[in-house]
Amino acid sequence: MKKILTSICIVSAFILGAIEWDFTKSDALKGKYALTTFGKQALSKNGLAAPVTKGDDRSGAATILKYPEFTPKGNFYASVEFIIDGKAKHAQAYLVLLDNKYVPTDKNPKNHCGFMLYLQKKKPGIFVPMAAFGYGKSSAVVTGREIKITPDKKHTLVMNYYAKNRVDFIFDGKSAGSAKVPAAVLVPGTRPLHIGNRAGKVYWPLGGTVVNVKINTLVAQKAKAATPFPRKWNFISAAVLKGKYAPKLRGSKITKTGLAVLNNNVKKPSGAFMSGKFPELTPPNAFEISANVILDAKFKRTNKWSMIYDAKYIAMPKESEKKYHKGFMFFFVHVKDNTYKLGGAFGYGTKSAQVLSKNFEMKPGTAYNLTMLFNSTGKVTFAVNGKIISIEDVPAGKIAVPEGKVAFGDRIGATYWPLGGTLKSIEIKTSKFTPVTALSVPVKRSVFEGLERKLYFI
């Protein structure tokens, strides 16, 4: 069987230049890829006629020779501009635009080559774009979404084929659905390319006019790496416990005001925790983390350290503990009475750094917005309710990506640092900071006046 397949469908690599047939031009049938037409008055100023025919009569056009490069290796697109005749009476449910495959799917090996682009008629004016692809030993047939085609009006259908596993249909500039296909290279068609009809009996004529056809290799744009930012956890709703980045509760509960972290036993975990691996939640260069918190007046602190967000585990590990020199923490430290300091700890791969802000006041029962901005140039900025309270130096360098475990309102493990209040929300953003737009909360211009020479934001 393998020899038979090899002799019928030959896998080759072809580089295709842009091919276009503009059937409104008188010389459309000439050139490198010359065409022959079927039927009377096939070519006119409106385009290539592909009317509904009877019996063995066919319409449309086909290349005079066989061109395997019409089935490009890798990514390619095919675009057809067409008009469906409002008076056409289709005897079949399928209307072919392009075909060098002949049969969408079949047991015969010679039909597992090439591709076909066509339409399925569902009801008057409603169609579904379809495509069939041959892989040598098998074929795949895919469909898009229903589209509305207005008779006697010009429309354009584009098919983008991505060899990795996807086909996109675009109708009149709008998405008409996507479908998965095998991650494989198409086997070139062994028949001439037919336009406006099938490559053999029984014919599936378009029943209209083909105005323009384009086929070309498709240079796929490199997809941007998926980023989870900006990422916000809103703890005033139980919905925060669902989704890809959903934490699980640890000895705490969600209330109407947020995540209540009131366990003062430093040997028992509290808050919320993500036990999977989420290294993408640690931006290496520059980021802003902001939290809205309310301290509880009745909470009795047994530890002066209170965690807001932990993706590091140990603030200042030993030099030899390399696995802990990764990630970052955001916390605050109780000084006395209602006086606190904001703090951050950062892992650089071979070392860590910890920094504290200047003192600020935070009263129980009042909501506060606490913000920390890290920049790999060596600056950390702390702000409370939109007002910068201090700018501190840290080693310049990128944060090393940790395993990705994350804790909210408490440490990841070991001796715990419970928040001692309610965590309403946490948000992390990545940005190229400027002095004016560094904070997401409203601030007065005067806060930043005179700081331009002191801040080294990128």
Image: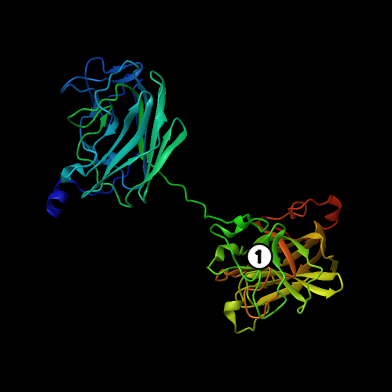
Could you say where residue 384 lies in the image, as x and y percent from the top left? 80, 61
**Image colouring:** rainbow
Q: Is residue 275 left or right of residue 389?
A: left
| Quadrant of residue 202 within the rendered picture | top left
Q: Quadrant of the C terminus?
A: bottom right
Judging by the rendered image, the residue that carries numbered circle 1 is 253
Position of residue 272 relative to residue 188, above or below, is below
Front residue of this view, candidates 123 and 360: 123
Position of residue 354 relative to residue 206, above or below, is below
Residue at the (73%, 76%) spot, across then down: 264
Residue at the (36%, 29%) spot, across then down: 127
Q: Residues within 10 Å of mark 1 (few under 14, many from 20)?
A: some
Answer whether residue 452 is visible to the viewer in this image: no
Front residue of this view, candidates 176 and 394: 176
Mark 1: secondary structure: strand
Q: Is residue 102 left or right of residue 422?
A: left
Could you say where residue 434 lies in the image, as x and y percent from the top left? 74, 54
Front residue of this view, candidates 265 and 111: 265
Residue at the (21%, 18%) spot, across then down: 39
Could you say where residue 206 lies in the image, as x and y percent from the top left? 29, 25
Answer whether residue 23 is visible to the viewer in this image: yes
Front residue of this view, candidates 376 and 228: 228
Position of residue 248 relative to residue 35, above or below, is below
Could you say where residue 335 lies in the image, as x and y percent from the top left? 83, 75
Dot 1 amino acid type: Lys
Total count of labels: 1
